[in-house]
Image (cartoon, helix red, strand yellow):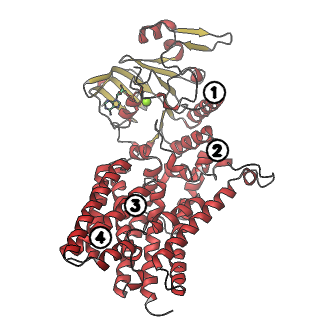
Amino acid sequence: MAGESHHTGSPSALVRVSHGTVVRGTSTIWSDLNLEVFPGEFTAILGPNGSGKSTLLQVLLGRMPLAGGSAEVIGAAPGARRADIGYLPQHRAITAAERIRAIDIVGLGLTGARWGFRIPGTGTAEARRERAQIHEALDLVGASHYAQRAFGELSGGEQQRILIAQAIVRKPAFLLLDEPLDSLDLPTQASVVALIREVCTHQQIGVLLVAHDVNPLLTALDQVLYIANGHALQGAVDQVITSSQLSALFGMPIEVLTAADGRRVVIGTPDAPHHHGHRHSDGHGHG
Amino acid sequence: MSGYLLPAIIAGSTIAVACGIVGWFIVLRSQVFAADALSHFAFTGAIAGLVIGISPQLGVFGCTIACGALLAAIAGRTLADDLTIGIGVTWVLGLGVLALAILSRNGNEGTGAATALFGSINTLTGVDAVIAASIAAVVIGVIAVIGRPLLYASLNPVAAHARGVPVRLLNALAFIALATVVAEATQALGALLLLALIAAPAGAAHHLAHRPAAGIGIAAGIGIASVWVGLAISYCMPTLPASSAIATVAAAAFAAAALIATLRRSPARRARRHSVITHTH
Ligand SMILES: Nc1ncnc2c1ncn2[C@@H]1O[C@H](COP(=O)(O)OP(=O)(O)O)[C@@H](O)[C@H]1O
Ligand SMILES: [Mg+2]
């Protein structure tokens, strides 16, 4: 399947999209998109609202076909390796979970797709292993001390950690996070980014994280994929995040400043939020 | 206790357990309005059954489950919206009023309509009790099999769907399980009051327990207790209909649970019961 790939990456890439094109209705969302993600690599998908970031995740989950090009996920067609992918959707229906214990929400990531129930007293070894796995995920995201509380009683950052724990509890090979920083304040964004970086390195998971503001991510990322105006640009942070590359992609002047400590700050991308905690900013379609 | 209470106790208890378990999911999914709608469909089904000349019981099951399946089909992978349900309810209720008019023109409206609206748990026979217990057993069995994926689909529908959980099928099964317990509860509590056994014990359980398994058990337990206490009260006060006694007990249980939850949520309790209560969250 990777035979047509024009990339020269090693065959162990978790994700490989070559010259991908997606059409929704009559409009082409993006075309000629190339992406490779390797284990332990942290990639951000960036771009204005409506540019097709979530659409790319749908393609990788096998829920939307490519109109052109090819895509491969964990060595198979998209959708074939569902159980090995952790996924945190963009629009999270959390109201129903208000009164459910956080640890049970994490547990659903492990056993939620299983039919039937275990008769008490049977399969205790497996149950014990599952419980250990759930606690391991809670430890990893630093949520153990509030795992027994109702989800609705937790802060936004704590809820986000619980949902990340749900996404990683199966020890997936590959993690898709759709705007996990949305509606979090800046310090919480920083700690969630640090957490994802650690999970990525520690578990050797390939991570694709969708965001519309790159700045909170810059120090943690391995590479970025920008999508804008139907085009995509993938590369290492210092190759892609430059004034000339971004200005060409967005078709407008964009400045990349380098601070004294070497960190970059991107100024002027459309959709960099004016203030944080702007839950409903999506869907207005700036793109 | 005299012999006529036994079928009432058996039928009432099994109905209460099924209503509690299904109700726990319905409250979780904010579908109480759909449950209310289905109780109206049950009323129309009962009257239509009388008009056509089949048993009202069959009419109730046929109409409620058919309407439940229709709602599920309209809803698809989402949950049916209140507008669709509300319009559906009034339309089907209109058909019920039409059926009632036909029935009264034939000089035959009296007890059938009253039974459909208010139930008659004390007139249930041994056969009714066996049927109720069997239906409850089937519903409980179905929920036992689909419970976990249904919970996943209710809490994280998009993630569950991406994992391959058949969210649309589970939504449909939840609607049909609900329609079945609504139809079954109609003969005991009547279309007007049956929501008491679906919403109140389950609502109380959501206030009292954050663990799904515990919550489901508590919902079933409060349902049974409501039936027993209600039956006992109406046994001692014959002027009080059993269905209103049961509904009152269930509502009281819900109010008590809500109160307990409010007291528990106070900041003082959260801070490991060390500080003084200042305000509730
Ligand atoms: N179900 C759909 N049918 C047709 N077009 C859609 C659908 N959902 C989204 N789109 C369009 O696809 C584009 C990309 O959407 P999306 O991937 O959600 O953007 P992003 O996640 O980057 O904000 C948008 O222009 C949107 O209008
Ligand atoms: Mg999106």
Number of residues whose C-alpha sits closer than 10 Å to that of mark 2, classed few (under 14), some (14–19) or many (20 or more) = some
Vertical arrangement, residue A130 with respect to residue A215, above or below: below
Query: N-terminal of the two: label 2 or label 1?
Result: 2
Residue at mark 3 to residue at mark 2: CA–CA distance: 39 Å
Can you identify the residue that label 3 sits on? B36
Nearest to the observer: residue B14 or residue B214:
B14
Image mark for residue A267: none
Query: N-terminal of the two: label 4 or label 3?
Result: 3
Q: Amino acid at mark 2?
A: Ala
Using the rendered image, report if marks 1 and 3 lie on a common chain.
Answer: no
Instruction: State the SS at label 4.
Output: helix
Q: Are marks 2 and 1 in contact (CB under 8 Å)?
A: no
Image mark for residue A143: 2
Q: Amino acid at mark 1?
A: Leu
Vertical arrangement, residue B176 with respect to residue B18, above or below: above
Number of residues whose C-alpha sits closer than 10 Å to that of mark 3, classed few (under 14), some (14–19) or many (20 or more) = many
Quadrant for residue B44, please give it: bottom left
Can you identify the residue that label 1 sits on? A186
Q: Where's residue A78, x and y in %?
A: 35, 36
Q: Chain of mark 3?
A: B
Nearest-to-viewer mark from 2 and 1 = 1
Q: Chain of mark 2?
A: A
